[in-house]
């Protein structure tokens, strides 16, 4: 498969460049030149297949030029090896629980798949993964690459600015995972990573690979759970199927768009967002204006300049009408997010985290204005136990913490304190 940049259709890029660099040289995002389609026959048969078999069918055309089918099969089997339940919540409304992976967040899907593909294409070359993190991305990436031979991972996180649970998840793995506690804020971490990638001396000595969310491979691994969950639904003939995706950088939603363009008959996609409304404003005005991000309860979605916007706009040929035909967007404030958590718990005995609550409420808002019969799915992106400090006071009950999380809370933190200047990071990387 050939890839191109969202900013230029003339230059072609091969899979290994897409995987091992992350960003196109012109600063655009990588996209396939042509999105491969699956026939409706093939998609129908998914109802009898396992998630691994579906993953192989969905992903093979992207990777077959470089990775053999039997090897890709192994990669799929070791990536998609935890449960992905589709829970009935209300009539005609399901929740797709994507938080049963090692870090209890949906980012495990993309990070685990990316880690295995990256290792496969890097062959025996030693690689160094560098990632700035303000929370969940870092631990998902770390777990993805944990104990993979030939790979070292450096996670840069801002000192005192991540939650205790998140810090423990970042700093207790050990082995090939190194947590760097930066004396600064998240922007300093991100700047340091960018500077490291631009530093000639450093890149001559070390093969650096970026693990941020614009990486195409991270995203395409997520298309799998749309095909899988769709195949488990049993809609009545007249029902349209609608997915609601809680969105921040819009990687998850882009994966849904690609699944739809590959032939999955999703009638509508709902982008559910918090008060960070850049995308909603764009749909309403046709003008894209990045905003400074605002803090909300669904903090992993506090993004004022969604990094995948450029990819989505490209996928719809920069045509607002086509985009609005497939996509609706609803913004849910913190007050309504809390109300949704309480309502789902009281009425359905179903506990959701704030991100998932935004997806639920976005779907309900969409349903009110949709005239056709529908079957809706909202995506649960994090385990409620990760957000017990928010949820507990709302429901007046202890929120159970999964054993996996509890175990990591007991382990001692191991991190290296560094200043927020590039020489500090460089000398640290050279020592090892
Ligand atoms: C990252 C994240 C999101 C947002 O996903 P995008 O792909 O960036 O839109 C939503 N919920 C949780 C819990 C996350 O960690």
Image (spheres, helix red, strand yellow):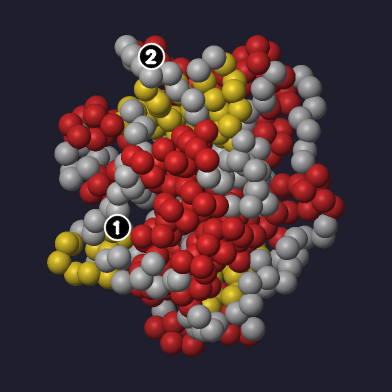
Measured along the vertical axis of the image, is residue 372 above or below residue 301? above
Give 382 or 179, whichever is nearer the viewer. Answer: 382
Instruction: Give the secondary structure at mark 2.
Output: loop
Pick the quarter of the image with the N terminus: bottom left
Task: Name the residue: 24% across, 56% down.
Answer: 34
Task: Name the residue: 46% across, 34% down.
Answer: 230
Specify whether residue 65 is in view: yes
Measured along the vertical axis of the image, is residue 380 above or below residue 169? above
The residue carrying pointer 1 sits among few (fewer than 14), some (14 to 19) or many (20 or more) residues within 10 Å by Cα, namely: many
Measured along the vertical axis of the image, is residue 240 above or below residue 411? above
Instruction: Kindly identify which numbered label has been placed on residue 278.
Output: none
Give 32 or 150, whichever is nearer the viewer. Answer: 32
Q: Nearer the viewer, mark 2 or mark 1?
A: 2
Task: Name the residue: 44% across, 71% down.
Answer: 67
Q: Position of residue 327 (x, y in %)?
A: 31, 31
Q: Position of residue 381 (x, y in %)?
A: 56, 39
Q: Residue 251 vs residue 108: left or right?
A: left
Residue behind mark 1:
31
Q: Residue 293 vs residue 326: left or right?
A: right
Residue behind mark 2:
373
Question: What whole-number distance in Å separates the C-alpha atoms at marks 2 and 1?
Answer: 34 Å
Q: Position of residue 210 (x, y in %)?
A: 46, 67
Q: CB of mark 2 within 8 Å of CB of mark 1?
A: no
């Amino acid at each position: 498969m050939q890839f191109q940049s969202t900013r230029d259709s003339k230059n072609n890029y091969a899979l290994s460049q897409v995987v091992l660099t992350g960003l196109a040289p012109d600063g655009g995002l990588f996209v396939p030149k042509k999105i491969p389609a699956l026939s409706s026959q093939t998609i129908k048969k998914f109802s009898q297949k396992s998630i691994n078999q579906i993953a192989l069918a969905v992903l093979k055309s992207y990777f077959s030029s470089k990775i053999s089918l039997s090897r890709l099969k192994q990669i799929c089997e070791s990536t998609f090896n935890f449960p992905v339940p589709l829970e009935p919540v209300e009539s005609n409304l399901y929740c797709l629980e994507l938080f049963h992976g090692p870090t209890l967040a949906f980012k495990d899907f993309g990070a685990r798949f990316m880690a295995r593909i990256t290792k496969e294409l890097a062959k025996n070359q030693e690689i160094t993964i560098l990632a700035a993190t303000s929370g969940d991305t870092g631990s998902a990436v770390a777990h993805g690459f944990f104990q993979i031979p030939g790979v070292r991972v450096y996670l840069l996180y801002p000192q005192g600015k991540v939650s205790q649970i998140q810090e423990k998840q970042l700093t207790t793995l050990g082995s090939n995972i190194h947590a760097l506690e930066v004396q600064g804020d998240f922007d300093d971490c991100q700047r340091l990573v960018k500077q490291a990638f631009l530093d000639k001396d450093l890149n001559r000595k070390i093969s650096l690979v970026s693990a941020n969310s614009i990486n195409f491979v991270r995203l395409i691994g997520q298309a799998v759970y749309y095909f899988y969950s769709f195949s488990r639904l049993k809609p009545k003939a007249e029902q349209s199927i609608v997915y609601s995706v809680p969105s921040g950088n819009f990687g998850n939603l882009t994966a849904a768009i690609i699944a739809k363009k590959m032939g999955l008959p999703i009638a509508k996609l709902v982008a559910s967002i918090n008060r960070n409304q850049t995308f909603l404003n764009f749909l309403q005005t046709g003008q894209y204006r990045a905003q400074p991000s605002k803090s909300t309860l669904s903090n992993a979605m506090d993004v004022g300049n969604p990094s995948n916007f450029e990819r989505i706009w490209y996928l719809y040929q920069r045509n607002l009408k086509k985009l609005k035909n497939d996509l609706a967007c609803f913004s849910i404030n913190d007050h309504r997010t809390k109300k949704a958590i309480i309502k789902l718990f009281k009425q359905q005995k179903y506990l959701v985290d704030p991100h998932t609550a935004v997806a639920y409420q976005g779907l309900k808002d969409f349903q009110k204005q949709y005239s056709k019969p529908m079957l809706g799915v909202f995506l649960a992106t994090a385990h409620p136990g990760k957000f017990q400090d928010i949820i507990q006071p709302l429901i007046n009950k202890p929120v159970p913490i999964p054993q996996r999380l509890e175990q990591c809370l007991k382990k001692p933190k191991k991190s290296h304190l560094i200043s927020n200047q590039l020489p500090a990071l460089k000398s640290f990387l050279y020592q090892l």
